[in-house]
Image (cartoon, grey):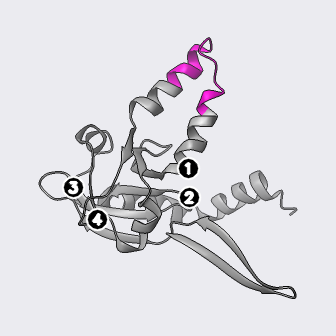
Amino acid sequence: MWYNLEYKTRMGVMSVAGIEFSGNFAHTIDPKGRVTIPAAYREALADGFTIGLNNQFAAIALYPREKWAQKCEQLSRIPESDIKGTRYVRLITGNSFSGCELDAQGRVLLPATLRAKVGMDKAIRFVGMGQYLEIWDEERYLSECGVSEDSIDDLLDYVNDQYYHAQT
């Protein structure tokens, strides 16, 4: 959700604007392929968003306009003469739908092609990923969580080594 984080400093109150999607919510897809976006996430998607796939191609992702613009800028750095890079760009952009908006009831139609790619059935799970939102098939999400929880020590070591350069 969009938020203005305020914290006190010696100079007064300082605001930091940002986007944050956190938490998870169980929901269902209606017979037409629509989902109702949880109220906690709607404000962050109010200015429009892009529907695509997450990096694992395991879930549908909703990218707020600003986050999608960042992704497009990164993709634009891959020259057309780079065949392998172009394949990646085609895969990402060819499986994304820009200019999406919520309807009056806070719903969005999830494209059938994306639902099929991620094996999405009726039961789904919204998962906040910081700057974007993922929508998982419920069973697939629970399976992914189980794998992650079973290897939490390895994941912590990896993240610390890769991103925080933790000394052991």
Where's residue 141, x and y in %? 38, 59
Q: Quadrant of residue 24?
A: bottom left
Type of the residue with mark 4: Gly
- For disc 3, the marked residue is 34
- For disc 2, the marked residue is 131
- Relative horizontal placement of residue 14, taking residue 93 as reference (left or right): right
- Whether the residues at callouts 1 and 2 have beta carbons within 8 Å, the answer is yes
The residue at 64%/18% (across/down) is 79
The residue at 59%/15% (across/down) is 80
Query: Can residue 86 be found in the magenta stretch?
Result: yes
Report crowding for label 1: few under 14, some 14 to 19, many 20 or more residues within 10 A (C-alpha).
Answer: some
- For disc 4, the marked residue is 106
Mark closer to the chain start, 1 or 2: 1
Mark closer to the chain start, 1 or 4: 1
145 lies above or below 87: below
75 lies above or below 127: above
- Whether the residues at callouts 3 and 1 have beta carbons within 8 Å, the answer is no
- Label 1 vs label 2: CA separation? 7 Å
- Whether the residues at callouts 4 and 2 have beta carbons within 8 Å, the answer is no
Type of the residue with mark 3: Arg
- For disc 1, the marked residue is 67
Quarter of the picture containing the C terminus is bottom right
Where's residue 6, x and y in %? 68, 81
Mark closer to the chain start, 3 or 2: 3
Type of the residue with mark 2: Gln
